[in-house]
Amino acid sequence: MWCGRSVGQAILVCTLFAFSNAETGNKSSTWKAAGCGDDIIRGVNLGGWLLLEPWITPVYFEEVNIGDLQDKIVDEWTYAEFLDIDTYLERMINHWSTFVTREDLEKLAEAGISHVRVPVGYWYWDVDEGEPFPAPNMDETDEFSPLFYLKRVLVWMDELGLQASMDMHSGPGSQNGYDNSGKRGEVHWVDDTYPENRYNIDRSVRIVDQMTQTMREWVDSGVIKIETLYGIGILNEPHICGYESGNKYKDVCLQDFYPKAYDAVRKYFNAEETNVVMDIASLGFGDYVGLFEEPTYSGVVLDAHSYQCFGGANHWAEE
């Protein structure tokens, strides 16, 4: 185990995720947490697995950007849009089944990692007319369903004592215009039609509800222990609430979506069971002062991403 050294010596990661040391109750007497036994959270991210990102998995995009499709497939939306459904599913099933293995997770546990963030796409629970994704397959026993692979990895994590932070990585309409939202380009999770048009915001709340319900069912049926579920991340990097709009939509996150998504999680899990993870949304920590405080809110974790391989901080990766 690498606990005697910096975790950075064990595993090089591009982004660091700020997890809280919030404790959850109802611990199983037989459960043993992975990590270094010092109550320090050391986490990594399963990026590029259940939501494709071309900078993480370039080969999956290089192989299909050929002929008439050259430079057209740039995110998972266009992956599903331009490939026929059978080809899309065949390629995704191969990816889901091989990109993250039990051996990978064993290496993480051996290295002293305690927490693993698991980004997922909203379309695994909800697909609208006009969207290119297959209809959700909620049968987690079916190897054609992404939930089969999600459940399998959570079971492995449960057996190894790793804790999962589930993360809704994509918002309908795109919450930041990046490929990590599932669709690169214009942002319509919220736009100038708000507040009259709040369809994608309300839909996102429903999807968080659906994802959380799935986690509740798996805990209640004994698929995983409650200790394995560190938290539910309600939406990754909704930068439209911050710098992308000049903070114009700040309150869409802080006063509208975040409180509603928090309530959706708390329908299924109380604060002693799991945390609600809120992305800082490219706002300042000061913007959260006085918000989401006890007793109205509890078990809230603020997730801030400090990138060390993009922009001005890239010297960390180059040195």
Image (cartoon, grey):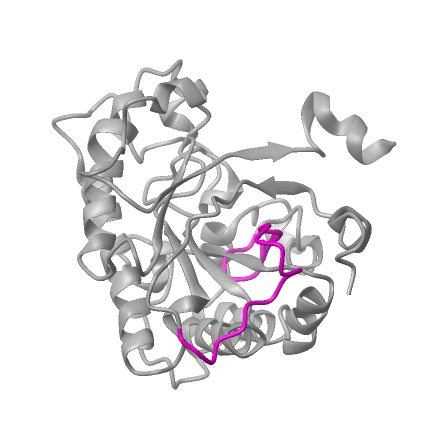
Between residue 230 and residue 22, name the one nearer to us: 22
Residue 245 can be seen in this image: yes
In the shown orientation, is residue 231 left or right of residue 98?
A: left
Q: Which residues are magenta?
A: 28-52
Residue at the image point whose x is 78% and y is 59% from the top: 2
Q: Position of residue 288 (x, y in %)?
A: 35, 24
Q: Name the quadrant of the C terminus.
A: top right
Vertical side of 106 occupied by 62: above or below = above
Q: Residue furthest left?
A: 196
Q: Position of residue 43 (x, y in %)?
A: 60, 52
In the shown orientation, is residue 65 left or right of residue 125?
A: right
Between residue 172 and residue 29, name the one nearer to us: 29
Vertical side of 171 occupied by 29: above or below = below
Between residue 184 and residue 1, name the one nearer to us: 1
Give the number of callouts.
0
Q: Residue furthest bottom?
A: 141
Residue at the image point whose x is 66% and y is 55% from the top: 57
Would you say residue 31 sits in the magenta stretch?
Answer: yes
Q: Position of residue 81 (x, y in %)?
A: 44, 55
Residue at the image point whose x is 66% and y is 51% from the top: 56
Would you say residue 72 sits in the magenta stretch?
Answer: no
Vertical side of 280 occupied by 138: above or below = below
In the shown orientation, is residue 191 left or right of residue 303?
A: left
Residue at the image point whose x is 68% and y is 73% from the top: 106
In the shown orientation, is residue 275 left or right of residue 203?
A: right
Locate residue 16: give its quadrant.
top right
Residue 129 can be seen in this image: no
Locate residue 241: give its quadrant.
top left
Q: Name the quadrant of the N terminus.
A: bottom right
* Chief secondary structure of the magenta portion: loop
Q: Position of residue 185 (x, y in %)?
A: 46, 34
